[in-house]
Image (cartoon, rainbow, N blue to C red):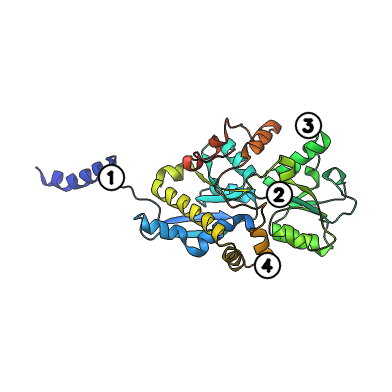
Amino acid sequence: MTPHRRKILPALLALAALALPGAPRAEVKEIRIARQYGLGYLPLLVLEDQKLIEHRAAQAGLGDVKVTWAVLGGGVASNDALLSGSVDYIATGVAPLVLLWGRTGGKVKGVAALDSIPVVVNTTNPAVKTVADFGEKDRIALPSVKVSIQAVVLQLAAERAFGAAGWSRLDRLTVAVKHPDAAAALLSGRSELTAHVASPPFVAQELADRRVRTVLSSYELLGGPHTFNVLSSTEAFANANPRTFAVVFAALQDAVAWIAKNPRAAAETYLRVSGSKEPLASVLAQVQDPAVRYTTTPERVGVFADFMARIGTAPARPKSWRDLFFPTVHAQPGS
């Protein structure tokens, strides 16, 4: 064997070893996750606070894995972050997942649900008894116009109120505002905002003011509980990092189980990690509200997918709710 061949042989053998089916593959050492504001993201705050992903990664033999967290203001910003490769996971409402799944040909999917929580329309306008009463002077706050779960719930309500052709009738009244800012503006009485499509803890904050009334609950609109938020990722990340992907899902299940067993500690975690100044008793009451369930099982996501495809917001309709999700939750009794 020539000296030249002796030098390149070890490199060729190493490459061959990497190609073997059983050979371990290097996976990412940093996981980047983006979430939004509110109690709907409580499982992720628990993951962050208790470093559950890091612990699971160490147990799985992945070594020291860093988890980086970002807080974004709405579904559009989250979608852009995932598609640009700025983050590996995003937590958003169901509607942004349906949109991303359709636009990417299924290359973006849900890893799991995070919760089932009602979307509520609150208003300070005494003339508004139902969504049909909103007029030209009203302004309705939600995180992202047209594509957030809040926007889609409002469109579903408009269709119910005005008929099939009226689903977009309230869109012109909507304004994109982060939940904390929307709640503060609505309660200030000095803003153009007269309504907020809200979720916990902002619902309770607003209803503590006697000027605020609820005119719609999505549970009533859809006939029962539905998934509010989901954790999503890309097929590229899942395929390149299968062990890491499994670790994140397992850690999420740990977080959901822990919240169920420790509601008070979970409420304390929310206040500490989010920096909210809301009273503990109020947050705890919302965590323990029977209408609020933290679960990885998708519920009624098909309703959103069907509606968004029918009105043309989403370019494709999944055959089943399972099409929208990775196999992580396919065995669960979803809908």
Q: Position of residue 226 (x, y in %)?
A: 65, 44
Q: Quadrant of residue 273 in the image?
A: bottom right
- C-alpha span from label 4 to label 3: 42 Å
Circle on res. 119: 2
In this rendering, which labeled residue sits more in front, label 2 or label 3? 2
The residue under the point 51% across, 49% down is 85
* Mark 1 or mark 3: whose residue is earlier in sequence: 1
* Mark 4 or mark 3: whose residue is earlier in sequence: 3
In this rendering, which labeled residue sits more in front, label 1 or label 4? 4
Tell me the SS state at disc 3: helix
- Check disc 4 and report the residue beneath it: 281
- Check disc 1 and report the residue beneath it: 23
The residue under the point 67% across, 62% down is 285
* Mark 4 or mark 2: whose residue is earlier in sequence: 2
Quadrant assignment for the C terminus: top right
In this rendering, which labeled residue sits more in front, label 1 or label 2? 2
Amino acid on which the number 2 mark rests in the picture? Val
In front: 282, or 234?
282
- C-alpha span from label 2 to label 3: 21 Å
Q: Position of residue 269 (x, y in %)?
A: 57, 65
Amino acid on which the number 3 mark rests in the picture? Ala
In front: 147, or 15?
147
In front: 238, or 42?
42
Tell me the SS state at disc 4: helix
- Check disc 3 and report the residue beneath it: 164
Q: Position of residue 39 (x, y in %)?
A: 63, 58
Amino acid on which the number 4 mark rests in the picture? Ala
For the residue carrying disc 3, how many other residues have a C-alpha within 10 Å: few (<14), some (14-19), or many (20+)?
few
For the residue carrying disc 1, how many other residues have a C-alpha within 10 Å: few (<14), some (14-19), or many (20+)?
few
Q: Quadrant of residue 56 in the image?
A: bottom left
Is 89 on the left-hand or right-hand side of 22? right
Tell me the SS state at disc 1: loop
